[in-house]
Structures are given as structure tokens and as C-alpha cells.
Amino acid sequence: MAKTVTTRLDDGYVKKIDEMAARKGIDRSALLRSFFLCALKEHTIRDSLEDYKTGTITLWEAAQRCNLSLWEMIREVKRAHIHTFYDLKEFEKDLRALNG
């Protein structure tokens, strides 16, 4: 079930949001929902990449957390220029995760 979330913004920001919403032909709520979901995805990917980089989670776990395929997550790792050592232990952990 959807919940209502409120926040306070300066009048200048609200004016810009309303102007953008009008240009797109949508209401303020739809635009803010779009902003929020985009930012949430971006932050989830960034946090997951950081956890992957530090070895806290595997690549597969990062992909699941981000609701991405493994190939999409690999593209995110490449885009972020993350270079990690992927050893047999990590491979086995990913295989166990894939097999349930």
C-alpha cells in the first residue's frame, strides 16, 4: 500500500519543480516521485558498489540488492572503474547464491 511522505522545500525549489512538471505535462507529485525513485536507485547502486569494492558483498549480492541482472551490475562496476580481485572463494560464494 502506498504511503504519503511529506517534506519541506524552499519556495524557489517548489517553483522550479512546478515549472518542470508543467513542461513535462505531469503534476508535482508525479515529478517528485520520479526524482525520488531515480535518486533511490542511484544511491542503492552507489552503496552496493562500495560494499562490493570493500568485499562486504559479492557481485551477485550487489546485483540482487540493486534489482539488476548480473550483466547490468558488471556494467555498473566497469562504469565506476572498480577493479577487484575475484578469487575462487568469491566464485564459490556466488555459485552458492545462484543455486539457492
Image (cartoon, rainbow, N blue to C red):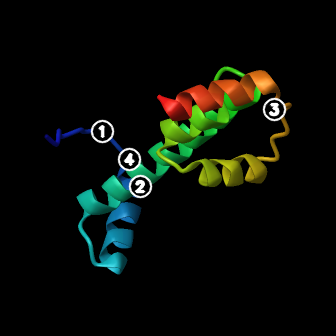
**Residue that mark 3 sits on:** 86
**In the image, 82: left or right of 66?**
right
Instruction: Give the x, y percent position of residue 31.
Output: 33, 62
Front tag of 1 and 2: 2
Q: Is residue 47 visible?
A: no
Disc 4 residue type (three-letter):
Asp
- Asked if marks 3 and 1 touch (Cβ < 8 Å), the reply is no
Under tag 1, what secondary structure?
Answer: loop
Question: Which residue is at 41% across, 55% downward?
Answer: 35
Q: Secondary structure at mark 4?
A: loop
Q: Residue at x 32, y 54 (%)?
A: 33
Q: CA distance from mark 3 to mark 4?
A: 47 Å
Asked if disc 1 and disc 2 are in contact, CB closer than 8 Å, the reply is no
Mark 4, other Cα within 10 Å: few <14 / some 14–19 / many ≥20: few
- Is label 3 in a helix, a strand or a loop? loop
Residue pointed to by mark 1: 7
- CA gap between label 3 and label 1 equals 43 Å
Residue placed under numbered mark 4 in the picture:
10
The mark lying in front, picked from 2 and 3, is: 3
Q: Nearer the viewer, residue 40 or 48?
A: 48
Q: Amino acid at mark 3?
A: Tyr
Q: Nearer the viewer, residue 98 or 45?
A: 98
- Nearer to the camera, 33 or 65: 65
Q: Where is residue 72? Give x, y as percent.
A: 61, 54
Nearest to viewer (mark 3 / mark 1): 3
Q: Is residue 18 left or right of residue 40?
A: left
Farthest residue, direction front:
99
